[in-house]
Amino acid sequence: MHTSTLPSVAGTRILVTGGAGFIGSHLIHKFLDLGAFVRCLDNFSTGKPQNLLPFREHRNFEFLEGDIRDFDVCKKAVLGCNAVSHQAALGSVPRSLADPVSSNAVNVSGFLNMLEASRLEGITHFVYAASSATYGDAKALPKIESEIGEPLSPYAATKLFNEIYARVYFKNYTFSSIGLRYFNVFGPRQDPEGAYAAVIPKFIASLMNGESPVINGDGSFSRDYTYIENVVQANLLALTATESHVLNEIYNIAYGEQTTLVELVREIKERLLNYDQNVKDVDPVFGPQRKGDVPHSLASITKARNLLGYEPAYDLKAGLTETVEWYFKNLN
């Protein structure tokens, strides 16, 4: 995706919450490249200081360490900004099952703090990270924004509450926002370590170490894996949207293709073979199915395409090629 094809945010003062995280740091990088002033708010609970190193000395970058659960911090963070990219959250279904109270405090109370602080500051563009987990037990594929089921985890419930609060703020305060339901985002810099690491970096790290990647269930579960550059594009489009019929909507942000876990391992192995022939002898092992997991996920991106102008440039294979190369260079 060439910068010239992306909307301009030059001169915009953007607050990125959770900017030290995987998605947030990619957004900051692109916003700075496009001439924006960027303030990052993060408490490093899941984000990494090293993700901010490339722009710590950038003249248009400012860092504020703090927690979105503190309303005074949120008010300080939005001061002087005109746009907010709200990425801060405690992700992971298993994490929310282990500690639902913390997930709610960050994802719901923290989100409400950011909404209210942004409203009081007169923020004109508020874009937030929603989640495909909101579809819950809805069986129909592909997933269409207007047709959700019952949440299957505390994490999914928190993300649904974000959407509800956003609607309430528009109805009562005419405060506009856009929610982006991410589908299984992956790419360089995503953390492969820890109990709540995403599946793609975990699989890549395991295979690079000559260890069998662990697939939860029989490997038939499928996801719509979405490369980070597609997500960056969607955020830029949302942050620059002005037409009333585009605002105050929820959009699926995905590629629009389904891949099973077994197929995913095969695609990763194929790319790692370019760097290490020993990978061909490492096969996955199968573990118990995870509680709260949705069996299949596939997005309709028609709404995002028609209203936002979203055109994902990277399919899974192209995204994995870039991602595997980055991990091979940075984890060895």
Image: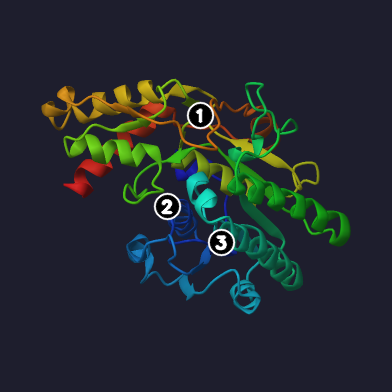
Label 1 Cα neighbours within 10 Å, binned few <14 / some 14-19 / many ≥20: many
Q: Amino acid at mark 2?
A: Phe
Circle on res. 102:
3
Are there few (<14), some (14-19), or many (20+) residues within 10 Å of tag 2? Answer: many
Give residue 22's mark.
2
Q: Please, is residue 176 above or below residue 246 in the view?
A: below
Q: Residue at (17%, 23%) from the top-left corner?
A: 280
Q: Position of residue 58 (x, y in %)?
A: 39, 69
- Mark 1 residue element: loop
User: Distance from label 2 to label 1 (Cα)?
Assistant: 18 Å
Q: Which mark is residue 324?
A: none
The spot of residue 320 in percent (x, y) is 34, 32
* Quadrant showing the N terminus: top left
Q: Viewed as shown, does residue 114 lie left or right of 50?
A: right
Instruction: Report the front residue among 207 and 5.
Output: 207
Residue assigned mark 1: 224
Q: Quadrant of residue 169?
A: bottom right
Q: Earlier in the sequence, mark 2 or mark 1?
A: 2
Above or below residue 299? Residue 192 is below
* Residue 130 shows in this picture: no
Q: Earlier in the sequence, mark 2 or mark 3?
A: 2
| 147 sits left or right of 83 in the view | right
Percent position (x, y) of residue 238? 64, 47
Residue type, label 3: Ser
Cα–Cα span, label 2 and label 3: 20 Å
Give the structural element (helix, strand or loop) at label 3. Answer: helix
Which callout, 3 or 1, points at the residue further toward the start of the chain? Answer: 3
Identity, as a three-letter code, of the amino acid under mark 1: Asp
Q: Is residue 95 above or below residue 246?
A: below
* Badge count: 3
